[in-house]
Amino acid sequence: MKICIVGAGSIGGYVGVKLAQAGEDVTLIARNANLEAIRSRGMRLTMADGVEHVVRHINASASLAEAGPQDLVILGMKANQLAAVIKDLPHLLHDNTVIVPMQNGIPFWYFQRHGGEFEDRVVHSVDPDGHIMRAIDPSRILGCVVYPACELAAPGWVRHIEGDRFPLGELDGRESERVLAISAMFANAGLKAPVLNNIRSEIWLKLWGNLTFNPISALTHSTLVDICQFPLSRELAASMMREAEAVATRLGISFRVTLEKRIAGAEKVGKHKTSMLQDVESGRDPEIDALVGAVIELGKITAVPTPHIETVYALMKLLSVRINDDKLAVRAQPMVAA
């Protein structure tokens, strides 16, 4: 299968190496130092158990037009980077090309093929003018939830931290031939991609933790275990999760685990820095709107109040402004004795 991964960062690079090693024809879209490293040395992947993988001869380009039509397009960049590639996306498409967006949070396609009173609503937090939704035919899209944690250790080098699950699902819940084929292809590459009949429920299950622990960790420079073991931050997380659950319930979503089990699961991860905290410490624009702002927006659509989420969102937006306007990297530094 011809596969193009647009965004060869941590998750895109991880998936690209696994699929290429399984014999798929993979092209990575990258830029700057990352592209140069992949072209000169290949793509390196260090697994959590220390095993090293290097795919030395892998297609890499900065141009979607150069890559040409593909059977599968994986959108591996963050939600706030999607709009920049949409105008060039047609270069990758033939009549039957499947698109798998791999963004965290509420996706731009959430209300497409959704049914009911909210059918085809635009989620403005992730797609402000509906441009992305209009540009991609929803019949091409498979929903996906990304569970692995990875980091780009250096240009052309991805370090895998944990996880290998990429649940997939048609937007309307059908069990189609194409979703089964792509699930099987992922499995052949050593990745778990169960086919779900309600991919939106899985999105909410992951988002339930992300929308709380990510911003709290970024604001307080705390790890998951720190947040869960400090009573006040644990209760703040629980309050945000209760609000999110109320929004999801209004949208027909039910959670298969309890709130306390979800918090306990986060606590077990231990001294892990969330991706949002890593962004703040590195001076990168944190991914706020897809994870937090979109939930507030869905709360307004469904008339469900989200006061705790809104408060944390306001603080994160201010921090984002400081990072972008002042070119600021906010890192906690140990005190040095005089």
Image (cartoon, helix red, strand yellow):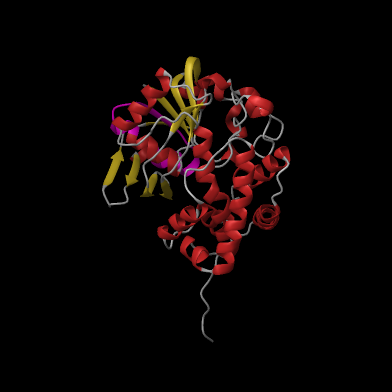
| Whether residue 89 is situated above or below residue 307 in the rendered picture | above
Give the magenta-colored segment's residue range: 19-38
Residue 106 belongs to magenta span: no
Residue 60 spot, x, y in % from top left: 42, 32
Q: Quadrant of the C terminus?
A: bottom right
Q: Residue at x 54, y 19 (%)?
A: 139
Q: Residue at x 65, y 55 (%)?
A: 316
- Quarter-wise, where is residue 12 in the image? top left
Residue 250 spot, x, y in % from top left: 64, 38
Q: Quadrant of the N terminus?
A: top left
| Whether residue 264 is situated above or below residue 87 in the rendered picture | below
User: In the figure, is residue 7 to the left or right of 241?
Assistant: left
- Is residue 82 at all visible to an observer of this figure? yes
Residue 67 spot, x, y in % from top left: 46, 24
User: In the figure, is residue 330 to the left or right of 303?
Assistant: left
Of 37 and 109, which appears nearest the observer? 109
